[in-house]
Image (cartoon, grey):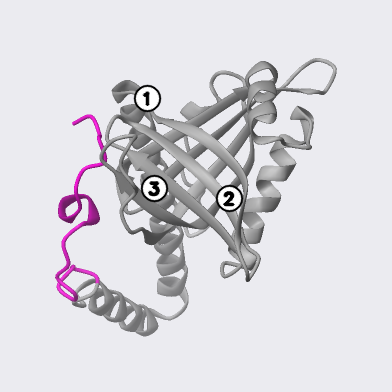
Amino acid sequence: MDAKAKSSPRRRLVDPSTVDGHEVLYDRECPFELRLKETAEDAPEIGTLEAIKVKILTAIKDDDTVESVRIELSSESDLFFYYVHDMDEGSFGLMQEQQKLMVDFDEYPKVLIKMLNDCIKEPHSHLAVFVMARDGRGRLDFIQNMEYKYVELLSADFTQVSDEDMRARIDFRYKQIKSKLEEIQNRQHNMFSLVKSKNPSLLLQLQRADDTVLMSPMSVGVKGGGTPRSNRRTPRGRRR
């Protein structure tokens, strides 16, 4: 195969989060303290700190104002962790009244992004605590450590996605990773083809090095021997 030959065009993957007109505004991992509670009356268990992928999406009206805001929480280490928060102007008004918020609905996405970035940049003073109940509900609390006391800045209610939505999102993530892997393999093949035409002995060295990496203990899962998080932790009220 010619090193300059073009690989077949990749099929464009459609994110199931955007099929209803929402657009991704923010997509980043953020440190969350995850807590689990059995019932609404119980106090949450002691939390664990984990990196949670936060995606903020917005739907915009014809007049360029925000029509709805969606927050999606997922985990790279647990495919069945997927919670969603949906908010329109009407439901935001109720939330605004209950929590005495001093921001308008159009500013809500910017406020969320600022709080998340603060948790990333200043994790000792800005905390994101996500409390999960076994009935599939969750609550995200943004808390600021003021040294002498903790101040709750904002709380957002979440629900676990349905089984159908869960499957669609898992399928999308799988195809996304597979597509990236194929792209890397195509680039590697093209590079090897080019090296073979210029310096065959160097190609043999590169292939041996590549085989060594593939057979290393870390690459085949020997090192560590840990159990996946979804198997060693109590299920969070997920639908199986």
Q: Quadrant of residue 186?
A: bottom left
Dot 2 or dot 1: first in sequence order is 2
| Magenta highlight on residue 226 | yes
Type of the residue with mark 1: Asp
* Residue that mark 3 sits on: 177
Q: Which residues are magenta?
A: 219-240
Which residue is found at the position 31% from the left and 47% from the top? 36
Numbered disc 3: secondary structure = helix
Residue 42: x and y in percent read 30, 42
Dot 2 or dot 3: first in sequence order is 2
**Front tag of 2 and 3:** 2
**Dominant secondary structure, magenta:** loop
Which residue is at the front of the view, 55 or 182?
A: 55
Type of the residue with mark 3: Ile
Note whether residue 145 is visible: yes
Q: Is residue 116 left or right of residue 235?
A: right
Note whether residue 13 is visible: no
Dot 3 or dot 1: first in sequence order is 1
Numbered disc 2: secondary structure = strand
* The N terminus sits in image quarter: bottom left
* Residue that mark 1 sits on: 165
Residue 108: x and y in percent read 71, 36
Report crowding for label 2: few under 14, some 14 to 19, many 20 or more residues within 10 A (C-alpha): many
Q: Are marks 3 and 1 in contact (CB under 8 Å)?
A: no
* Residue that mark 2 sits on: 142
Please tell me whether residue 108 is drawn above or below residue 229 in the rendered image.
above
